[in-house]
Image: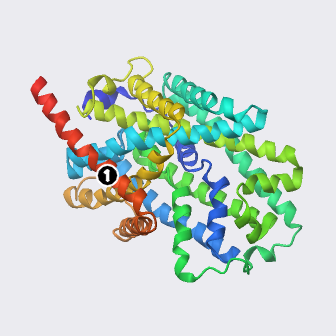
Amino acid sequence: MTAETSSAYLRRLGTWDAAAIVIGGVIGAGIFRSASTVAERTSSGAQLLTLWAIGGLLTLAGVLCYAELGARRPQAGGVYIYLREAYGQLPAFLFGWTMALINYPGSVAAVATTFADYTCAAIGLSPQMWVKPVAAGAIAFIVGVNFFGIRAGSRMLNVFTLLKLSAIALVVVAGVILAHGQFGSVLAADATHNVPSSAILGALLPVLFTYGGFHYLNDLAGEVRDPQRTLPRALGLGLGGVVICYVLVNFAYLSGLGHDGLAASRAPAADLMRRLFGEGGATLIAVGIACSTFGYCSIAIAGGARVLQTMGADGMLFSAVGRIHPTSHAPRVALGVLGGWAIVLVLWGNFNWLVDYTTVGEWLSHAFGIATLFWYRSHFRNEPSPYRVPLYPLLPLLFVSTVLGVIIVTSISQPEDAGKSLLLIAAGAPVYYIWRWWQRRSA
């Protein structure tokens, strides 16, 4: 990124704003759905809660690595910046190609549709008629708010983060009430799900994927105040809060539904609230889940647009995408491109394959992004860094090896999805060389 574009962003985000980005980027709709999948692949409540705690600790290892990377390079663009410096333009472009042009808008389209599903259910609209218009309208509204700058977007995000935490607190309270003080069965074995120990690793996959999204703050690092101090604090506080929420929510599910009931439920939060408050409770939690998904979309659009803008400033995309508005200090063109493409995917309706096939690419980017820490440590031995990841090199090695192991397991269990994900990444290579050839010819 050039000095001009880097300085065009204003550092307006404090510690709470940054921590809210971490919480909002991780907690979407996953915890309200994927807990039942984990229950299906475990044999007891003890195993289930242990897996959620292990997943949180592994993700925390990655977050601590991202904290050092963000402190070393507190610029907008996140992983794109680290890959460009450590490995060169092509790997950085492949990351941008996969994430900012496919994964970010694909995930926004999918989660916006989930928001529309819950919103229509809560207010009684026909899903066949209104889901797509509501999802597209939500994306357009989020883009419009972010046009006014990161401060306006963070204020909206803070509100929705509080609402989603309130929904989680409500689920936890409902589970405790339904348990009637009988918490001994929470950790008990489930005779209906006798899963062999060798298959439990498969239960870790949905846990890790539910913890995804912690990297969005690094995409917005160029707008964080005192980033060398704020980034580590916000990443640690944010993910620590997420781990506590996830463990408490699963404890509530087990308390109110039991392990077998959780495994059989497709919407455990709604089932839990329905048992205590009837259909009104199910509607209330639907509103909470809608708020949670809306907040995630806001973060994904804001973070993805900064990656696009950084690529445009680097000459990896059209120069207009790299512009930052002089008044709002927002990447309006990048926001419009990302939001517009996400709306196209919503209306097209075939975006799920994009999300499925690029999940492997997203986690590969995490592995390679954190691996750049070894490059920074070896090439900038004397560079001052106010934060250094503890237990180096153990924590980055643990995270990278675990993520690569998850990808290998995914590739074995879902070879078609993994293969198409890798093909989508590889398709960016000829695009890169064609773009470079076109630039040279134009010059």
Considering the numbered disc 1 on the image, is that residue within a helix, a strand or a loop? helix
Number of numbered discs visible in the structure rendering: 1
Q: Residue at x 53, y 31 (%)?
A: 347
Image quarter (top left, top right, bottom left or bottom right) of the C terminus: top left
On screen, residue 180 versus residue 219, left or right, reads right
Q: Which residue is mark 1?
A: 423
Q: Residue at x 59, y 36 (%)?
A: 157
Q: Is residue 276 above or below residue 10?
A: below
Q: Is residue 379 above or below residue 432?
A: below
**Most foreground residue, 352 or 200:** 352
Residue 230, visible in the rendered structure: no
Tell me the amino acid under the disc marked 1: Leu
Q: Residue at x 55, y 42 (%)?
A: 110
Q: Residues within 10 Å of mark 1 (few under 14, many from 20)?
A: some
Image position, residue 227 (x, y; %): 41, 43
Residue 275, visible in the rendered structure: yes
**Most foreground residue, 442 or 28:** 442
Image position, residue 47 (x, y; %): 64, 76
Image position, residue 440 (x, y; %): 11, 29
Image quarter (top left, top right, bottom left or bottom right) of the N terminus: top left
